[in-house]
Structure formats: C-alpha cells, structure tokens
Amino acid sequence: MGQKKDLMVDGRAIGRRIVEEQPTKELTPRDGSIIIILATDIPMTARQLKRISKRANVGLNRTGSYTDNGSGEIVISFTTANRVRHYEKERTIKLEMFNENEIDLIFRAVAECTEEAILNSMITARTTVGMDGHVRRSLAEYADLVLQM
C-alpha cells in the first residue's frame, strides 16, 4: 500500500523518522493492495453505500499511501439496517435511508475509521520475516518514535 518513508500517523511523518533511525532496503515492486470493509447499521441505499465507499481512500491517504500504479484498492460496504426477509410475503416493503443533507458526518467517520483500522493493524501486527529474509517490523517496535513526535 505504500513505502515506509511515507507513513503518516496523526498527520506526522513518522515513516521518514523510522527510515532515519533504522534504514532498510525498499522492496520492489512498491505496489500493494488493500481490501477495506465498511459495515454499518445506519440505514443507507446502495447509492449512499457507494458514495461512502469512495471516502475510504481519504483514510488510506491519511496514512501516507499514494495508491501507486499497481495498487488495487477494494472497498466493500454494507448495512444491516434494512432487513429483507428471504420469503417476503408483501408486494412492497418500506426501506429507510439516511438523510442526504447529513451524510457529510458519515463521510468524515468513514475516513477516520479507515485510518484508525489501518494503523491499528500495523501496531498489532507481529514482526515478520518474508522471502529472502526480508524483515517487516511491527509499528509497535517504533512506538517510542511515534510518542516523541
């Protein structure tokens, strides 16, 4: 999803600081993909779910990702609010939807939740040794650098 040097936490360039403290060779290609799943109980239409899906990239970008040429971000959104029975007997059913004039609040929430989920996954991940002995450290190992900034 990006390069270590571009990592941002709370608007601060943590990645640059990590690279300064512990330089490592960047792997090529730098491309990567991410799958983001947005689940809510807010009543939304398919159109609204598509609109909030597009806002997930805002949260991704806040972490320093530039969605490079080979990246393939996938965002899946769903709501549990409008339940439709498998064998519905009524000819028409009522569905609720969120007020479009208030949806900016949801856009902001999607961006913040996406950013938080990405950073949470990076800080709770374990250090990993991959192919050819390449090491990827948990963000938790750099917590002191994050706190210093």
Image (spheres, helix red, strand yellow):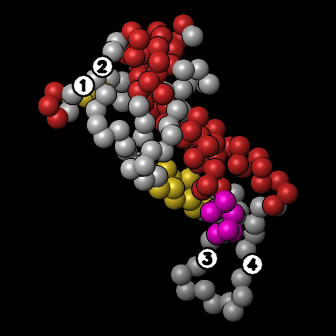
Closer to us: mark 1 or mark 4? 1
Quick check: is 48 in the magenta stretch?
yes
Main SS of the magenta segment?
helix
Q: Is residue 80 above or below residue 69?
A: below
- Circle 2 is placed at which residue position? 24
Indicate the amino acid at tag 4.
Answer: Lys
Indicate the amino acid at tag 1.
Answer: Val
- Circle 3 is placed at which residue position? 84
Quick check: is 50 in the magenta stretch?
yes
Q: Is residue 40 visible?
A: no
Indicate the amino acid at tag 3.
Answer: Val
Q: Residues within 10 Å of mark 1 (few under 14, many from 20)?
A: few
Q: Earlier in the sequence, mark 3 or mark 2?
A: 2
Tell me the magenta residue range.
45-51
Give the percent coordinates (x, y) of residue 10.
61, 24
Q: Earlier in the sequence, mark 3 or mark 1?
A: 3
**How far separated are the C-alphas under marks 1 and 2?**
9 Å
Name which quarter of the figure residue 124 lies in.
top left
Q: Is residue 91 visible?
A: yes
- Circle 1 is placed at which residue position? 135
- In the image, 115 versus 124, the foreground residue is 115
**How far separated are the C-alphas under marks 1 and 4?**
53 Å
